[in-house]
Image: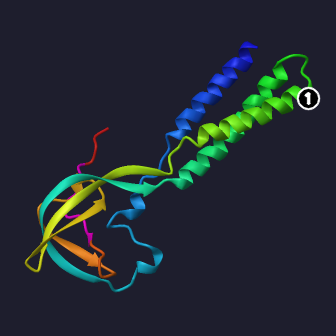
């Protein structure tokens, strides 16, 4: 019985850790391109960055949520089956009931992962053609600095201000 309890605790711990997984939002950064944008002409302008401030960007996290539900459901079913098998007279019905209960509980635990998540971003205030604008983007503060930068647009309201600074490399 102690072994089954330890297995259940381990399964719950792994489920909780996995449920912390979330989308990074990297696909929304200004310097990330879709395959159809590579080797394609895009309008570019220079802008003058006035200020860079921290921001949060809400991104879709449904894929991570679905993965957490599947993983936790499978893990719960395995743990529940093992616990059900170790209880009583090792009857197959206990194993099946434990697996089903564990699978449902695991999937429910996996559903605690949110459908949306917040990722780090920047709010960039810039001047273009004498007008002051602001653009919120996914990225790190250290990637942008006041001064000249290149802005790429593939649409009328798209402002992909390219990083004009390099983040320091973390020492190990």
Q: Is residue 52 above or below residue 21?
A: below
Dominant SS type (magenta): loop
Is residue 18 located in the magenta-colored stretch of the structure? no
- Foreground residue among 81 and 163: 81
- The magenta stretch is 160-168
Q: How many residues crowd around disc 1 within 10 Å: few (fewer than 14), some, or many (20 or more)?
A: few
Q: Quadrant of residue 112?
A: top right
Q: Quadrant of residue 125?
A: bottom left
Quadrant including the C terminus: top left
Q: Position of residue 51 (x, y in %)?
A: 13, 59
Q: Is residue 151 above or below residue 12?
A: below
Extreme residue toward the bottom, this view? 41
Residue drawn at (61%, 37%) of the image: 109
Question: Disc 1 marks which residue?
Answer: 92
Residue drawn at (56%, 55%) of the image: 63
Q: Position of residue 49 (x, y in %)?
A: 13, 66
Q: Is residue 152 above or below residue 5?
A: below
Extreme residue toward the left, this view? 130
Q: Position of residue 25 (x, y in %)?
A: 41, 57
Q: Secondary structure at mark 1?
A: helix
Q: Position of residue 30 (x, y in %)?
A: 32, 67
Residue drawn at (73%, 33%) of the image: 102
How many numbered marks, from 0 up?
A: 1
Q: Quadrant of residue 81?
A: top right
Extreme residue toward the top, this view? 2
Quadrant including the N terminus: top right
Q: Is residue 150 left or right of residue 86?
A: left
Is residue 167 located in the magenta-colored stretch of the structure? yes
- Foreground residue among 1 and 65: 65
Residue drawn at (91%, 29%) of the image: 92
């Amino acid at each position: 019985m102690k072994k089954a309890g330890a297995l259940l605790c381990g399964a719950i711990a792994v489920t909780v850790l996995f449920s912390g997984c979330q989308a990074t939002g990297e696909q929304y950064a200004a310097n990330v391109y879709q395959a159809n944008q590579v080797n394609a002409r895009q309008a570019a302008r220079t802008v003058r960055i006035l200020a860079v401030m921290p921001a949060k960007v809400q991104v879709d996290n449904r894929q991570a949520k679905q993965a957490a539900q599947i993983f936790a459901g499978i893990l719960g079913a395995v743990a529940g089956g093992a616990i059900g098998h170790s209880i009583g007279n090792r009857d197959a019905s206990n194993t099946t009931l434990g697996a089903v209960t564990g699978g449902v509980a695991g999937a429910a635990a996996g559903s605690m992962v949110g459908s949306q998540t917040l990722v780090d971003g920047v709010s960039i205030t810039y001047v273009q053609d004498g007008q002051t604008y602001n653009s919120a983007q996914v990225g790190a503060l250290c990637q942008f600095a006041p001064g000249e930068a290149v802005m790429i647009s593939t649409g009328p309201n798209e402002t992909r201000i390219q990083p004009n600074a390099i983040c320091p490399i973390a020492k190990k």
